[in-house]
Image (cartoon, rainbow, N blue to C red):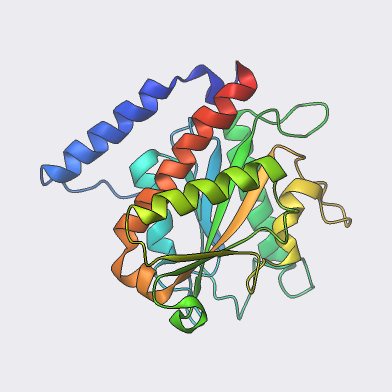
């Protein structure tokens, strides 16, 4: 049995309840245990969330500030896997195709993604494609000047990094849940920050030896304004934790029912 399938939703809810209880009663959160590598660090999660979050541009200089904190919050809140870049994009940009200067970092990052998928036991041993829907959220930062202090842009390189069904679902979920925080939040899709071509590679491959994992792999690039990252981080993280958990019940569980 696949680990992600055999564990039921009540395990996830119990984890969340215990985590909230612990925090509300003054407990000191346990530090996240990362697998430390040269260009990244990552945590495999608890093994029941079919997806991961990352912050590839978290390191200075030229850092997307607070994106690493977003990833850490999601790891703690729902037990999902997370990857954080530990080297500046100016030294090695992990959010690009291999270009000679970043090859070692890209190889390390892709190896971590494969490790997460193997941990969940959702790679078909023969086709090497995913056997269950998988949601990947990649967090980045943008200036307030683009869409205002409460701006979010979602990029999927114009729909190539996910299915049309998952993209429509994600858009509706995000818009609805954001309104619970503030009606002033402005959300746009695939306008300025549509995503680098590399965001489709986990799904479709890169035509240069990296085959990708097939149609079950769904990636969204999330650009958050500086104000949202700095002042609304906890509330924004709740939105994405809900989206990640809803994906499990509305796609992963349905796919295996």
The structure residue drawn at horizontal position 24% and vertical position 32%, both measured from the top left corner, is: 18
The one nearer the camera, 138 or 257, is 257
Outermost left residue? 25
Q: Quadrant of residue 232?
A: bottom left
Q: Is residue 34 visible?
A: no
**99 to 256, vertically: above or below:** below
Quadrant of the frame with the C terminus: top right
Q: Quadrant of residue 89?
A: bottom right
Q: Is residue 163 left or right of residue 134?
A: right
**116 to 144, vertically: above or below:** above
Quadrant of the frame with the N terminus: top right
Across and down, in percent, residue 42 comes to 50, 51
The one nearer the camera, 171 or 157, is 171
Q: Is residue 224 visible?
A: yes
Across and down, in percent, residue 55 comes to 51, 62
**171 to 62, vertically: above or below:** above
Q: Quadrant of residue 154?
A: bottom right
Across and down, in percent, residue 69 comes to 37, 61
The structure residue drawn at horizontal position 47% and vertical position 35%, both measured from the top left corner, is: 246
**2 to 181, vertically: above or below:** above
Outermost front residue? 183
The one nearer the camera, 186 or 159, is 186
The structure residue drawn at horizontal position 55% and vertical position 41%, both measured from the top left corner, is: 51
| Figure disc tally | 0
Q: Is residue 184 left or right of residue 104?
A: left
Q: Is residue 132 left or right of residue 173?
A: right
The structure residue drawn at horizontal position 26% and vertical position 46%, both measured from the top left corner, is: 30
């Amino acid at each position: 049995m696949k680990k992600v399938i055999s564990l039921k939703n009540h395990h996830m809810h119990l984890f969340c309840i215990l985590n909230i209880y612990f925090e509300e009663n003054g407990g000191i959160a346990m530090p996240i245990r990362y697998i430390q590598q040269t260009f990244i660090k990552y945590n495999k999660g608890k093994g029941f969330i079919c997806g991961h979050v990352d912050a590839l541009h978290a390191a200075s200089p030229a850092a997307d500030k607070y994106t690493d904190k977003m990833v850490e919050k999601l790891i703690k809140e729902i037990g999902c896997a997370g990857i954080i870049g530990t080297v500046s994009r100016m030294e090695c940009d992990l959010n690009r195709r291999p270009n000679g200067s970043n090859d070692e970092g890209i190889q390390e990052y892709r190896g971590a993604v494969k490790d997460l998928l193997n941990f969940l036991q959702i790679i078909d041993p023969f086709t090497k494609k995913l056997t269950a829907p998988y949601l990947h959220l990649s967090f980045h930062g943008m200036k307030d000047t683009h869409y205002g202090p409460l701006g979010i842009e979602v990029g999927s390189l114009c729909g190539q990094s996910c299915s049309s069904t998952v993209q429509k679902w994600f858009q509706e979920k995000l818009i609805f849940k954001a309104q619970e925080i503030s009606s002033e939040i402005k959300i746009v899709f695939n306008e300025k920050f549509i995503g680098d071509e590399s965001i489709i590679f986990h799904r479709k491959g890169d035509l240069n030896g990296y085959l990708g994992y097939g149609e079950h792999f769904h990636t969204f690039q999330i650009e958050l304004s500086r104000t949202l990252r700095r002042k609304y981080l906890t509330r924004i993280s709740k939105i994405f934790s809900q989206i990640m958990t809803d994906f499990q019940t509305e796609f992963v569980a349905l796919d295996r029912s």
